[in-house]
């Protein structure tokens, strides 16, 4: 557990990407920033530009139109960056598993660091996933990614 | 030799770069915490801004967009923070020893305070992004809007102190004759100045250049890693020094004895919290509304205060 990793876990900036979601997850994301849950007390801020972000929060089932854009955003994120698959669709395509339009799940397009289950996930599940992400960051000290 | 070493120390450590950026990050935390409390949230811990800054400096990659001018893109953050550090050095050194200023230092300060927005503009134009260019052009319009009332209301303390363009003499005048904000013209020009400072710091309702929700932080959009961190430091230093500048002009400057120091902290927090409350209770205005506001009512108010001051009120 290095000091640099510890500083990183205290200040994770998140960028929200909706890759064809039904908006429930997106509303739950805003719910996490409201007074009851207040993710800012853990240092998490929602930013508008991917160049400022440390986490790529990906909601939705990653449909065909979105796949190139997901890849580009992942490449534009300054490394070290982390990807969080948000909700049932983000984690496994959910009920769109056999759709003509969703060829691949998110974790076969880009490497995913944490999954948040639920349709939509509760804010408690989000906080639990962020704790898991922080433990993961602290555990892999000195890794380049 | 000793003199130049002293200047380097003043610029780099105290009260320049190191001190004012540390203070700026703490003041930035006050901003975030008060904002959070006003929204009935808990808010981040006190070291939050330090963690953000260290993360950007130690950990994150600095990306330069394809098609960007590298020298301008990476040079402008340095220019912005150098100018901000120089502003805080000059203001604080003059506050600690009022005789150490030079004739016309107030005008030099006005010029130095214009450099961070100008550097931000150039950096944004150099970053080859349409939203950054849009933000930069808005920044330019915002600057054109708030500079005339800012400079006009700056004339009031100068007239009050007996037509001296020297920050040290303005402080000495206030030590002998009471605060400038206590007079009618001083109070009006203080209000004008406060709103101009709000726009200078890029706070809501005048955060049009970096509107998070429409042009996703505008000029900063392509900045990442160390370049972003240096820009953020420049912004933090300006946030720290602008209330000190207001205290110097209107509340008699900083005092070094205990009682005066406590009063200074209270004045500082009053100005800071006023700025934060204005920020949190107002929606963002459009650029044309901001321009009309600054060139209309505020310019008239500033002119009225200058007229009152020259008649001795």
Image (tube, rainbow, N blue to C red):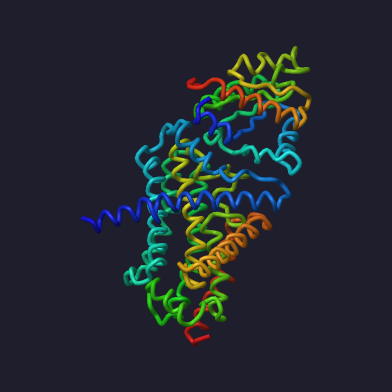
Q: Nearer the viewer, residue B72 or B246?
A: B246
Quadrant where the image shows the N terminus of chain B = bottom left
Q: Position of residue B150 (x, y in %)?
A: 49, 67
Name the quadrant containing residue B112: bottom left
Give above or below for B157 relative to B211.
below
Total number of numbered discs in the rendering: 0
Query: Which residue appears at 60% of the width and 38% of the height?
Result: A47
Q: Name, please, the residue furthest toward the left.
A: B1
- Residue B114 appears in the picture as rendered: yes
Can residue B294 be seen in this snapshot? no
Residue B275 placement, left or right of B155: right
Most extreme residue toward the front is B258
Quadrant hosting residue B84: bottom left
Q: Quadrant of residue B115?
A: bottom left
User: Residue at position x 42%, y 31% from top?
Assistant: B66
Give the residue at x 63% y 16%: A107
Which residue occupies 56% across, 27% down? A73
Say above or below: B91 vs A128. Answer: below
Q: Position of residue B57 (x, y in %)?
A: 45, 36
């Amino acid at each position: 557990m290095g000091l640099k990793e510890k500083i990183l876990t205290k200040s994770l900036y998140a960028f929200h990407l909706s890759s064809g979601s039904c908006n429930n997850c997106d509303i739950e994301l805003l719910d996490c920033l409201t007074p009851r849950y207040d993710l800012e007390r853990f240092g998490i801020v929602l930013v508008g530009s991917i160049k400022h972000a440390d986490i790529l929060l990906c909601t939705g089932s990653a449909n065909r139109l979105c796949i190139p854009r997901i890849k580009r955003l992942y490449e534009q994120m300054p490394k070290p960056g982390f990807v969080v698959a948000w909700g049932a669709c983000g984690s496994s395509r959910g009920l769109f598993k056999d759709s003509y339009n969703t060829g691949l799940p998110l974790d076969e397009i880009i490497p995913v660091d944490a999954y948040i289950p639920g349709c939509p996930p509760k804010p408690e599940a989000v906080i639990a996933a962020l704790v898991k992400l922080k433990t993961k960051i602290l555990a892999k000290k000195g890794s380049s990614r | 030799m000793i003199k130049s070493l002293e200047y380097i120390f003043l610029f780099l450590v105290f009260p320049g770069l190191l001190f004012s950026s540390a203070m700026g990050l703490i003041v930035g935390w006050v901003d975030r915490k008060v904002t959070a409390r006003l929204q009935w949230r808990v808010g981040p811990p006190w070291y939050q801004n330090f963690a953000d800054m260290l993360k950007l400096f130690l950990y994150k990659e600095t990306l330069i967009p394809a098609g960007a001018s590298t020298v301008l893109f990476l040079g402008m953050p340095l220019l912005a923070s150098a100018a901000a550090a120089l502003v805080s050095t000059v203001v604080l050194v003059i506050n600690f020893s009022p005789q150490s200023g030079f004739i016309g230092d107030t005008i030099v300060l006005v010029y130095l305070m214009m450099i961070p927005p100008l550097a931000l503009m150039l950096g944004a134009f150099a970053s080859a992004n349409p939203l950054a260019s849009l933000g930069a052009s808005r920044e330019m319009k915002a600057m054109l809007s708030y500079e005339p009332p800012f400079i006009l209301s700056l004339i009031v303390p100068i007239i009050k102190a007996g037509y001296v363009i020297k920050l040290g003499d303005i402080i000495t005048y206030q030590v002998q004759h009471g605060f400038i904000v206590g007079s009618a013209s001083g109070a009006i020009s203080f209000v004008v100045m406060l709103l101009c400072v709000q726009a200078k710091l890029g706070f809501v309702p005048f955060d049009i250049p970096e509107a998070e929700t429409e042009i996703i932080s505008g000029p900063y959009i392509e900045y990442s890693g160390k370049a972003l961190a240096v820009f953020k430091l420049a912004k933090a230093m300006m946030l720290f020094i602008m209330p000190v500048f207001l205290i110097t002009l209107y509340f008699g400057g900083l005092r070094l004895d205990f009682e005066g120091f406590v009063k200074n902290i209270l004045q500082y927090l009053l100005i800071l919290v006023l700025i934060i409350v204005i920020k949190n209770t107002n929606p963002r205005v459009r650029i044309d509304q901001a321009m009309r506001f600054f060139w209309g009512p505020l310019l008239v108010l500033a002119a009225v205060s200058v007229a009152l001051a020259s008649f001795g009120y």
